Every structure is written in C-alpha cells, then in structure tokens.
Image (cartoon, helix red, strand yellow):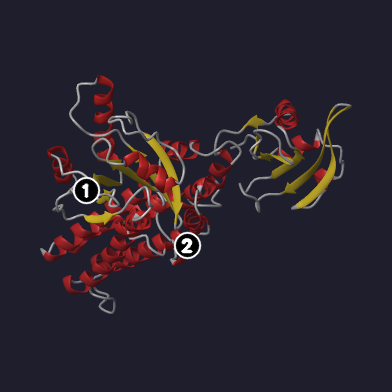
Amino acid sequence: MNTTIAAISTNNIGLGAINIIRISGPEAIEIVSKIFSNKKFSQAPSHTIHYGYIKREDEVLDEVLVMLMRAPKTYTKEDVVEINCHGGSVTANKILELLYEKGAVPAEPGEFTKRAFLNGRINLLEAESIEDLLEAKSENARKMAINGVSGKTTKLIQELREKMVGLLANIEVNIDYPEYIDELQITKENITPVLTEIKNELEKIIEESENGQFIKNGITIAIIGRPNVGKSSLLNALLEEDKAIVTDISGTTRDIVEGELLYKGINLKFIDTAGIRETNDLVEKIGVEKSLAIKQKADITILVLNNNEPLTKEEQELLDSIENQKAIIFINKIDLETKLEKVTTSKKIIKGSTRTKKGLEELKQEIINIFSLEDMSYKDLTYLSNTRQISLAKMSLQTIENVIEANEENVPVDMLAIDIRESWENLGQIIGESYEDELVDNIFKRFCLGK
C-alpha cells in the first residue's frame, strides 16, 4: 500500500451542490499541495479545513474547500485529503485527472475501506457492515448495519471466542502441567456446561441472524395460483398502484411482474406469476414453468384461490406442493357467492377481496409473523449480516456439537481441544482475525468506487 489513491466519493450522476474527491496514501498531502493555491496547507495541523483554488498551472479549475487529515487518525490510518469542489461530473473529473497527473492512482472499488481493514482500523465484520449501511433500504436495515459498524456485533463474537480460549487454556494447563493441582481439573462433568452455554449462544445468534437477513435483504414473496383468481389484482392492491395488467382473459399474465412495499420496516418483494395450468400455448407454457421455478426460490408463497369457483385438481396439487414450504392461502373474492368448498391445509388461510381491500392488512401482517419479525424496530439488531458470516457461525456450531458428543463418549480432552480450537478459528474468520487474500479482494470489490 505504498501508492496514493484517489476517487470521487460522492454520487456525481447529475448535478449536486458539492462533490468530494478523496485521496489517501503516503503522498496525499504532497500531491494536493502541487495543485492547491493555499501555500500554508501542507504545514497545517491535522483535521483542518482550508479555502483556495485548484489550479493547473495558471488555469483555475475550481474554488474549493480542502480537508487535511494526518495519519493515523483517519479512515484508512493513512494521510487523507478530501477536496470539496462544486457539483457536477465535469469539474470533479477534471480535478481527478489532475491528481492522476501529479502521481495519484485510481482507487479500486472499496479500496479506501480495504486499506482501513488492512491497516487495522476496522475488522472484516465492521467493513462488511459499512457496505450494508450504504445499501440499507429501511430503518431496521440501517440499525442492523450500524451495530456492525460500531463494533457491537464484533463484541458478540469476541465474547464467544474468549469463552473458548478460557476452556482451551485450562485444558492446556491440565495436559502440560498436571502437577499444578490448584488449577481447575478439566473433566467430562465441568467441560459440558461451558460447551452447552457456547452452543446455546451460537444457536441464538444464528437463528436471529437468519431472520435478520430478511431485515437486510427483504422478503421475496411469490404470488401463485391458476389463471383469473386475482393474482395480479392482489399485487396491485397490495402496492396500491396498477403494476400488473388485469383483464378477464385467462392467461393475461405470461411473465413475472414485480413490486416492492415497505411494511413495518421490512421490504416486501412481491412477484406476480403467470397462472399455473395445463396449456398448449408455448409462450404461456414458458410462463408457467417460470412460475413454478419462482415458487421454489421465494422466501414465502401466497397461493390465491377463488371463493367464487370450486377447487380444481391443479389447485389441489398446488396445495399439496406448498405443505413443506412457508406459505399462506389467500381466498379472494369473498364479496361474491361462495362456491369454494372447505380447503384442507396446515397453512394459514386468509379470506379477503382485492376489490374491497379486505384481508390485505392481515395478509401483510402474517408474512411478518411467519418470519418472527414483529416489533423488530424495538429490538437490538445485533446480528451477523451476510451468508459468509452465518456459514462460518454454523460451522463453528457444528464443531461444538461434535465436541459435546465426543465428550459424552469420554474422548480425551486433548482431542477435544483440537475441535474447540477449530471452532474458535471459524469465529475468528468472521471478524477477520484470519483471512485469505482472495476472500478480502472479493469482499471489497462489491463496494462502490470511492468508499
């Protein structure tokens, strides 16, 4: 990291009041001094702001404010300079070109945050939480991300690792120095409570983190059913807009139509699918195949039935197919004569009407209930935030469960120590105590340019 990087850190698509160009590295102050009219800048104390002009020789490019931040108390722990110039892409890009001419190099996506991680200012979990904070689409997602950025989630993992270290230390003393009888003698009886406590805490973290993924990413909901039961009408009614085309002609919806709704802090992503039925129409058949595929991938399915028509063989097959999935039955058109016989299912049945809007609020609330996301706004959203982190936590849990089982079978404690250390290392990978360069590169490539 002996280069000095530069990039535009603000979104400069279109016009705005200002743009911020960030420069970080060993020559950041020197490079900016070459193009900044304020001659006192390079000798100024850290964390100060300076007024002047950015100039290419005698040509003034812009009137600016320049912030000077000296290492190590900066975002990257390197010298950092931020140039606040006027908005619009032309001016910012001209200044950026000039910085490159004077010795800076273009920053890669996420390189500022990557340097913050490699220089020890933040750990890997905190770095990933910064990305989550930038992409948060709801207040709950923001709260979850800020807990990661501030270190609250890191503390959760560190406390678990400390318990494992304490256990490992006692085991090592018992193995290496058996003559020290004052030390705790590690036996099957006194190791089990500690392992069980670690296991229970990991299970809680994983369960809440998996639900927390719905806070971060939203819930994908497939609306399925045979043609003309009111799937598209349901989508339009939920979104309160005419998103999907609605007609009395069977098979109107032949491709997926999507829409999003923020409900109680959770992003609900509805997908209206083509009516599912036997058909010889090639285009409609492709739509049906898409519908079945989306049903399998969605987080939850809403099966729409028509109160005004008898249950068909195809609908009974759909009912059977969702028994092992998260699903809700919505019986539509209850404002019409009831011709639908009693539906036998283990799933929640909600009766309503897309025309009168009856049942829609209950339907949205049931989606939240199924994922145990009620009142998330009032909870401490200290969760693992992505698949990588949750996967490592699951690996750590599985190893601890194996240790508990081995302990019951009287496996020697020195053998147990090997697996406990493996579990400890897996948790360490979550926060970046150990990592592979390729993993780090892939994580930071997902960041926006200038962050």
Give the farthest residue toward the bottom: 182
Dot 1: element: loop
- The residue shown at (30%, 52%) is 335
Q: Which mark is residue 325?
A: 1
Q: CA distance from mark 2 to mark 1?
A: 34 Å
Query: What amino acid type is highlighted by mark number 2?
Result: Lys
Query: Label 1: few (<14), some or many (≥20) within 10 Å?
Result: some
Residue 110 percent coordinates (x, y) = 54, 39
Give the farthest residue toward the left: 409
Give the farthest residue toward the front: 337
Q: Which residue is mark 2?
A: 152
Residue 75 percent coordinates (x, y) = 62, 49
Residue 18 percent coordinates (x, y) = 73, 41
Which of the pair 128/39 is nearer the observer? 128
- The residue shown at (23%, 65%) is 175
Q: Is residue 370 above or below residue 228?
A: below
Query: What amino acid type is highlighted by mark number 1?
Result: Gln
- The residue shown at (56%, 33%) is 108
Q: Which image quadrant for residue 62?
A: top right
